[in-house]
Amino acid sequence: MTSHILDKPPQGAAEDWTVPQHWSRYTADDHAIWDMLFARQLALLPGRASQSYLRGLDLLRLSKPGIPDFTELSDRLMATTGWQVVAVPGLVPDAVFFDHLAHRRFVAGNFIRTRAQLDYLQEPDVFHDIFGHVPMLADPVFADYLQAYGKGGLRSLEYGALGRLARLYWYTVEFGLVQEEGALRIYGSGIVSSHGETRFALDDPSPNRIGFDLMRVMRTRYRIDDYQQSYFVIPDFATLLRATEETDFAPLYAEMAHLPDIRPDEIVAGDRVLSRGTQAHALSRA
Ligand SMILES: [Fe+2]
């Protein structure tokens, strides 16, 4: 989801930018890193992750130990919600990314982080992309949401509103919280795949936790270099799907063009604040 990339697929990639996963090229250490990250997150996620996410994890558990083979994973995902996982060589152009989503194909990096990068990584690796994203794709409602997002993304390019729509992805698919049985649960891939942010997003007094509102989210800038300063909470996935499928985004984009952006730490009039953060974490790093 950025623009500093090539205009056409690099050598060895198909027209749609996909490449073979080359599963057989992973080393024993690559698989060991996956297994270690998997076990570490699994110990944290029950009681913290959404039931939808935890149910979807079964899909990954069916895989052999180590990094899953995308072909096997896609077969199971296809039988569950009609999604597939395809490998790409790093970041791809926005239109390519959206087109894959609109066709129920999730694009994943095929490299895995090194032991020196266990907790911080700039570019999403196979652990983030698969462990973080694939379980939610097994949820039928979320699966429809992500496809609707892809279609909306393609339209947003016509309106020059890509940046607004990217924020929706960020604050839901990547860093979303959901209300379940009276408690907050995490479902965003950036949280569930991060040892530190899994606890921070739910337990730390630092960030704001604010009720989801489509336009509010699309006006809010975000952090790419640290934990989020605000998280947005959806009541359930059906609400998120409806908000995306049934909203005509064009008038919203037109309206937002006259409104200022909202800072990542800001609380604004009209917010449904679940908890107002101290922002101590961000202040300590400033
Ligand atoms: Fe992601």
Image (tube, helix red, strand yellow):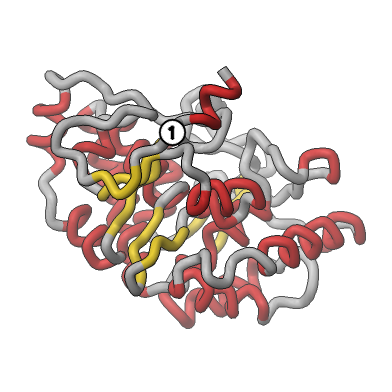
Residue 20 to residue 182: above or below = above
How far from the left and from the top, in percent, is residue 271?
20, 40
Can the viewer see residue 16 in this picture?
yes
Give the quarter of the figure containing the C terminus.
top right
For the residue marked with disc 1, what is the amino acid? Thr
Query: In the picture provided, is 179 more to the left or to the right than 31?
Result: left
Residue 116 to residue 285: above or below = below
How far from the left and from the top, in percent, is residue 28?
91, 61
Viewer-proximal residue among 104 and 179: 179
Viewer-proximal residue among 193 and 241: 193
> Is ligand 1 closer than 8 angstroms to the Cβ of mark 1?
no
Give residue 262's quadrant in the image: top left
Tell me the SS state at disc 1: loop
Give residue 68's quadrant in the image: bottom right
Query: In the picture provided, is 28 more to the left or to the right than 81?
Result: right
Can the viewer see residue 19 in this picture?
no
- Name which residue lies at 34% across and 24% down: 263
How far from the left and from the top, in percent, is residue 21?
70, 57
Q: Farthest residue to the right: give it.
A: 28
- Name which residue lies at 69% across and 38% down: 120
- Name which residue lies at 31% across and 51% down: 149
How many other residues sit within 10 Å of disc 1, few (<14), some (14-19) or many (≥20)?
some
Viewer-proximal residue among 261 and 156: 261
How far from the left and from the top, in percent, is residue 212?
26, 49
Query: In the picture provided, is 53 more to the left or to the right than 264?
Result: right
Residue topped by disc 1: 278
- Name which residue lies at 25% across and 61% down: 241
Give residue 166's quadrant in the image: top left
Query: In the picture provided, is 89 more to the left or to the right than 202?
Result: right
